[in-house]
Structures are given as structure tokens and as C-alpha cells.
Image: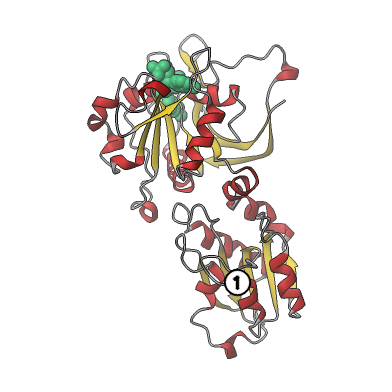
Amino acid sequence: MNKIEAMKLAISEAQKGFGKVSPNPPVGCVVLSPDGDLISKGYHRHFGGNHAEIEALEKIEEETLKGAQVFISLEPCSYEGKTPSCAKRLAALPIAGVYYGSLDPNPRVNGAGIEILKNAGKRVTHLSECEEDAKSLIEVFSWNVSHNLPFVAGKVGITLDGHLAHSSGKSQWITGEESRKDVHLLRAQYDSVLIGKETLLLDDPSLNSRLSEYRDLENWVIVFDQKGSLLDRIDEFQISKVRDKSKILFVVDEELKHSSSIAFGCPVDSSGFFDIPELLKRIYKKGIYSILVEGGARALSSFVEQKSLHQIYCYIAPIILGGKSGINWMSDVFHTDLGSAMYLENVRHKSFGNDIRISGRTRYK
Ligand SMILES: NC(=O)c1ccc[n+]([C@@H]2O[C@H](COP(=O)([O-])OP(=O)(O)OC[C@H]3O[C@@H](n4cnc5c(N)ncnc54)[C@H](OP(=O)(O)O)[C@@H]3O)[C@@H](O)[C@H]2O)c1
């Protein structure tokens, strides 16, 4: 195995921790012999549990580690937290060197793990070829440690002409099976999925991840319902059949916050929209560190209007619905000219069957 293959394997190991390690980042580790043979691999399995390095090294005799190379998707931690410092543990082993995919953005680490290894005489190499993938693994964590707020992504499946549903409200299914499978992977990466009331009524989605490896995850669901009009009907919906009700929040007008155990109050602005920046502060305090906004158009547009959507995953299907018969997914957003439009950064394209996914980070003016 060469060093790039080893780091890619470490990154795919890290992905196994999606949905289980929050608010920690998912991390994977691979150990190769001096000849490039795989000795061991591991990942951070759950919050509070062993870090990836320890998982990978735990059962290996020190003798076997002589001259080994260790590949870690994230710089090893430098301080004792819920577990001992991984950098110190690695420094004490007879390994030759460490390759890492990305620096730890946590100010308590951010280079300190590397210093410990270098001071112990280990060769430390940043594998820049894999940095983009390694960074995208930890984008929620990076946002959390630098802003103390949840990271918010929007996901939408649209026609080639920009509609997320027929004007009758029907949207199942615009995108193909492969795209929908990818959405199940996305759901596993986010602590919660948020939808507007109309989407709950029209689509009655489950909003969990149905990939076999994440089937036992219970992600949060957040529903925008100002007047709390659906609170009494919660048992009718799929969202409450696949998760405990303690993992469901209905965001309602501040005055209705005591109307039900699942009601979560938020101030409403003069145009009748929730104050989303304030909502994000409250949601973070509740221990929800990331949100995937899955629609509909009004919910998604309001996040953009309030500059609170940080990442977009847009699945585009080769279907033309026509401007007179569809709902545009950014229906409530208005720009005076092209120059004031929002552009995405770090844009990526990926194919899923006949669909294309365009994703990127938002940049607000
Ligand atoms: N293709 C896809 O990927 C996809 C995904 C999801 C949904 N859809 C489709 O989208 C359509 C629904 O979209 P939609 O835009 O009509 O409805 P929506 O966003 O699901 O729900 C709209 C309602 O939610 C509440 N709401 C949303 N954002 C709010 C905010 N910022 N502040 C306060 N309240 C807010 C409001 O209800 P109250 O004022 O009554 O509280 C609003 O009338 C459906 O046809 C669905 O099938 C498609």
C-alpha cells in the first residue's frame, strides 16, 4: 500500500464514526509496516471512547511497530481529555513516522500534537494530496470549535430547471435511487435534520439514515411550525415512528414554548420568520452541533436569507418541469442583479446515476 492509499483508507475508516462521535470529529488511523504492508487500522467509534490511533495500536506488540508508519486523518491530540494524549502515546512507540491529513482546528491542539511527535524525534509529514478529503471529514467540528454554533448544510433534490417539487406539492421522486442513497450517508453525518411544516404534511418523511451501518442511529428532527399546529398530531408522522419523541423538536413561536414537551421556542421577526441566528445559539446549547436542512423551499430560502446556511448539497436530475408548474427551491430569495447573487466556494461535482450533485460552501456578501 502506498501512502496515498493508506491515507484514503484512514479517511474511509473515519467515516464509520459518522453520527456516533459528535461533538468530536470522526478520525481514522492506518498502520503500515516499513514495507508498506497493512498492520492495523481503527477509527474513533463513539464519543468518549478510544481515539482512532489507540483503536489501531491497542492490540499490536511494540516489536511489530518498529519502523512502522502511522497514517491519521487528523493531527493526533496533544492533551488529556476524556482519553490520554494520542501524540504522547505515539511518541513513546518505536514507530518511524506519522502522516496526517489535516491539522486539528481545535485551538487547544492546532500543531501541538505535531510538536510533541517532532520533539520525540519522529518524522511527521502532512499529506497535502489528501487534505481536502481530510478537511471535509471535520467541517462540522471545525465550525463548532471556531464559532461555538451548529454547522448548517442544506440538501435538495431538484429538476434541471431548478424546481424541488411540482406546484401541486408532489416531489417524490425527482432524483434517482443512487442520489437518495447518498442522502442517507449525509443524514448520518449530521446530528439533526430540519424541515418546514409543509414538507412534513406533504411528504411524511422518516428523515433517518437507512444505510445498514447507521440503522441504529437516532438523529434529531427539527420541524418549523410557528403556531404549533401539528404538535397534537405528532404520532401520525413517520418521524415519530422511527425515533424516540425526545429527539424531535417543533420550533414554535416563543409564546407557545410551554405548549408541549417537544415545542422549542424561538423569536419571530417582523416579516413572520424565525430569527434563525438566535435559534442556532439555542440549538447549540441543547447539544445539537450540526443541522441538515432538507427543505422545503421556504425553510431553505429563509436560512439563505438570514445568511445561516454554510454548505449546500444540490442533486440535479435531468428532468424539465417548466417554470409554470414547479416550486423553485430558493423561492423566497431576491437579488437585484447577478452581481449580488450568492456564489459557492470549494465547489465539487459528483455523479449519482443520471443525477449530478453540486456541493460547496456558501459565501455571503
Ligand atoms: N426535492 C426535495 O429535495 C424536497 C425536499 C423537501 C421538500 N420538498 C417539497 O417542498 C414542498 C414544500 O415546500 P414549502 O416551501 O412549501 O414548505 P416548507 O418549507 O416545508 O414549509 C413551509 C412552512 O414551514 C414554516 N416555515 C418554514 N420556514 C420558516 C421560517 N424561516 N420561519 C418560520 N416558519 C417557517 C411555515 O409554516 P407556519 O408559518 O405555518 O409555521 C411555512 O409556511 C413540498 O412539495 C415538498 O414535497 C422537496
Q: 201 and 272: which one is in front?
A: 272
Q: Is residue 251 left or right of residue 361?
A: left
Residue 304 is left or right of residue 168, and the answer is right
The x, y position of residue 124, in whole percent, is 74, 71
Q: Residue 240, position in %: x, y? A: 28, 37
Quadrant position of the C terminus in the picture:
top right
Q: Position of residue 69 (x, y in %)?
A: 66, 77
Answer with left or right where residue 348 lies relative to residue 285. Answer: right
Q: Residue at x 39, y 41 (%)?
A: 220
The N terminus - image quarter: bottom right
Q: Which residue is mark 1?
A: 86
Above or below 140: residue 154 = above
- Count of labels shown? 1
Q: Residue furthest bottom?
A: 63
**Quadrant in the rendering for residue 257:** top left
Residue 104 position in % (x across, y down) = 66, 58
Ligand 1 is within 8 Å of the C-beta of the residue at disc 1: no
Q: Is residue 265 visible?
A: yes
Q: Secondary structure at mark 1?
A: helix
Instruction: Give the amino acid at mark 1.
Output: Cys
Q: Is residue 24 above or below residue 99?
A: above
For residue 165, say whether it is visible.
Answer: no
